[in-house]
C-alpha cells in the first residue's frame, strides 16, 4: 500500500543529511571537520541545567497546559517588553516543542488548500516543506546577492496574487546571516498590509547579532503590523538549548488559540522540564549568552577573511546567526564537477570537510558553512577548502 501523498513529495533536510554523513565518516575513524550543524557548540548554561534538575527533584514531571505553562508565558511576555518594547497577553502566546513546531502548527492553522506563501530565496530548508504539508503553495522570490540577499518591497508586490496568504521574513537569516534594518522591515510590512497578508516573522537568531547592528521585529513597526505579524522564536539558538525543544509564537489570540487546540492533539504539551529550564533562561543574567556571542563574532571575522582569500570565492558578510553563505559558482565552473552538490560531496570525500550545498536553501551557487565550532577547526577547514579549490581550478 502507498504512503500518504503529502509525505511522498517531501525533500529530506540537506543540513541533517550532511551532518549524518559527517558523523558516519567520523565513526569510521576519519578526521572530519563538520561545518553543517545548525546549533551552538556551547553547552547549555549551568543555571539553566540547575533549574531543570530542581524541577525534576520537585516533581515537575507531569502534563502542563497544551499551549505552555503560565509562568513561561509570563517570562516570554516580559522578554518581549524588555527586548522589543512589545506588549502581549497570555492568550497571545503559545509555547511549542521547538520553534520548528511553532512554524509547522502555524501553517496548519493559517493555510487552506492552494493558499500561497511568499518564501524569499535563500530560505531555511523546512519552510517550503511545512507549507506543502499544510496544502499550501510556496512562491519563491530570489533575493539578490548584490542586495545582501534581502527581499525588496517591489519584489514582494510583484509576487502577490489573489491566492497569496502570507510572507515569511527571517531576520537574522538562516542560511545567510543577513539582518533587515528597521526601515527595510517597515517597508516590507507596509506592502504586506497593503495586500492584507499575514507576516510570519522568524526571529530565532535575534540574540546573535554582531558589530553595532541591532535586531528589530516586524511587529514593532506599527500597531497594524503587530496585528498582522506572528513572531516565531525560541531558546534553541540564543541559549544553546537546541535539544530542549522549546519554541513559541506570539500573535493574534484567535490564531494562538487555534494553534493551541491543534497542538493539544499533536504533542499534548511541550516537555515540562524543558519549560522550567526556559523560564530560567529568560529570568536570569545573559552574561553567558553575551560571552557566547563574542566567541561567535570572533569566529565570523576570522573565517570570513580566510574564505574571501580563496580565489574566485565571494561572500556577503553576515550581521548575525552563525553561518557564512559564500558564492562558489566560479569555483565549481572551473572544476570538473557539474553541480555544487557534487563539489560539496567530493570536498567531504577528499578533504573531510562537511558543508551544506546551497541547493537545499534554493540557491545552487552557494554553500553554507556553520562557524559553531572552534577557531582551530575553522582555520584547518579553511586550509582544506583552499587546497581543494586549488587542486581543481
Image (tube, rainbow, N blue to C red):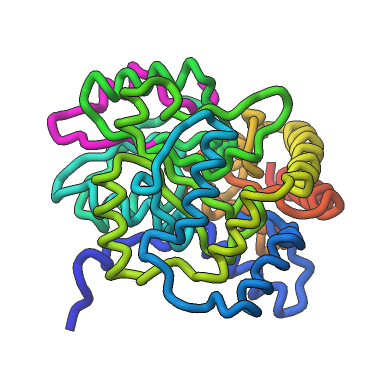
- Whether the magenta-drawn stretch holds residue 95 is answered as no
Instruction: Name the residue rendered at 68%, 73% in the picture.
Output: 53
Relative depth, front residue between 204 and 150: 204
- Whether the magenta-drawn stretch holds residue 158 is answered as yes
Say whether residue 14 is left or right of residue 367.
Answer: left
Measured as percent of width and height from the top left, residue 26 is found at 72, 73
Say whether residue 111 is left or right of residue 305.
Answer: left
Q: Report which quarter residue 32 is drawn in.
A: bottom right
Whether residue 328 is visible, yes or no, is no
Instruction: Name the residue rendered at 62%, 29% in the picture.
Output: 316
In the rendered view, tell whether residue 276 sits above or below residue 187: below
Instruction: Name the residue rendered at 51%, 55% in the picture.
Output: 72
Q: Which residues are magenta?
A: 146-168
Whether residue 297 is visible, yes or no, is yes
Q: Report which quarter residue 205 is drawn in.
A: top right
Relative depth, front residue between 134 and 110: 110
Measured as percent of width and height from the top left, residue 339 is found at 50, 48
Measured as percent of width and height from the top left, residue 289 is found at 73, 47
Instruction: Name the residue rendered at 78%, 33% in the picture.
Output: 305
In the rendered view, tell whether residue 97 sits above or below residue 195: below
Measured as percent of width and height from the top left, residue 389 is found at 71, 44
Please identify the quadrant where the C terminus is shown. Answer: top right
Amino acid at each position: 500500500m502507498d504512503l500518504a501523498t503529502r509525505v511522498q513529495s517531501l525533500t529530506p533536510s540537506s543540513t541533517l543529511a550532511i551532518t549524518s554523513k559527517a558523523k558516519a565518516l567520523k565513526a569510521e575513524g576519519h578526521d572530519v571537520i563538520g561545518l553543517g550543524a545548525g546549533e551552538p557548540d556551547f553547552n547549555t548554561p549551568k543555571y539553566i541545567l540547575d533549574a531543570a534538575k530542581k524541577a525534576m527533584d520537585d516533581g515537575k514531571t507531569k502534563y502542563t497546559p497544551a499551549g505552555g505553562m503560565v509562568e513561561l508565558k509570563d517570562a516570554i511576555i516580559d522578554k518581549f517588553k524588555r527586548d522589543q518594547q512589545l506588549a502581549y497577553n497570555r492568550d497571545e502566546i503559545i509555547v511549542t516543542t521547538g520553534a520548528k513546531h511553532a512554524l509547522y502548527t502555524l501553517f496548519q492553522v493559517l493555510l487552506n488548500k492552494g493558499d500561497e506563501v511568499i518564501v524569499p530565496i535563500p530560505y531555511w530548508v523546512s519552510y517550503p516543506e511545512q507549507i506543502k504539508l499544510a496544502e499550501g503553495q510556496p512562491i519563491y522570490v530570489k533575493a539578490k546577492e548584490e542586495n545582501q540577499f534581502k527581499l525588496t518591497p517591489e519584489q514582494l508586490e510583484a509576487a502577490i496574487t489573489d491566492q497569496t496568504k502570507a510572507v515569511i521574513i527571517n531576520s537574522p537569516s538562516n542560511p545567510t546571516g543577513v539582518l533587515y534594518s528597521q526601515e527595510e522591515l517597515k517597508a516590507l510590512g507596509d506592502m504586506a498590509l497593503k495586500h492584507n497578508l499575514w507576516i510570519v516573522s522568524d526571529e530565532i537568531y535575534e540574540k546573535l547579532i554582531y558589530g553595532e547592528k541591532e535586531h528589530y521585529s516586524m511587529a514593532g513597526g506599527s500597531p497594524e503590523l503587530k496585528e498582522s505579524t506572528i513572531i516565531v522564536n525560541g531558546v534553541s539558538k540564543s541559549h544553546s538549548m537546541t535539544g530542549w525543544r522549546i519554541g513559541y509564537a506570539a500573535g493574534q489570540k484567535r490564531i494562538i488559540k487555534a494553534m493551541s487546540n491543534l497542538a493539544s492533539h499533536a504533542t499534548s504539551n511541550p516537555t515540562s522540564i524543558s519549560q522550567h529550564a526556559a523560564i530560567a533562561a529568560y529570568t536570569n543574567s545573559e552574561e553567558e549568552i553575551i560571552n557566547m556571542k563574542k566567541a561567535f563574532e570572533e569566529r565570523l571575522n576570522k573565517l570570513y577573511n580566510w574564505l574571501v582569500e580563496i580565489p574566485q570565492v565571494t561572500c556577503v558578510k553576515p550581521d548575525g546567526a552563525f553561518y557564512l553563505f559564500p558564492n562558489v559558482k566560479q569555483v565549481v565552473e572551473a572544476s570538473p564537477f557539474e553541480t555544487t552538490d557534487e563539489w560539496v560531496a567530493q570536498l567531504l570525500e577528499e578533504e573531510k570537510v562537511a558543508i551544506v550545498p546551497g541547493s537545499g536553501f534554493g540557491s545552487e551557487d552557494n554553500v553554507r558553512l556553520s562557524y559553531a565550532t572552534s577557531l582551530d577547526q575553522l582555520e584547518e577547514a579553511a586550509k582544506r577548502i583552499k587546497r581543494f579549490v586549488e587542486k581543481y581550478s
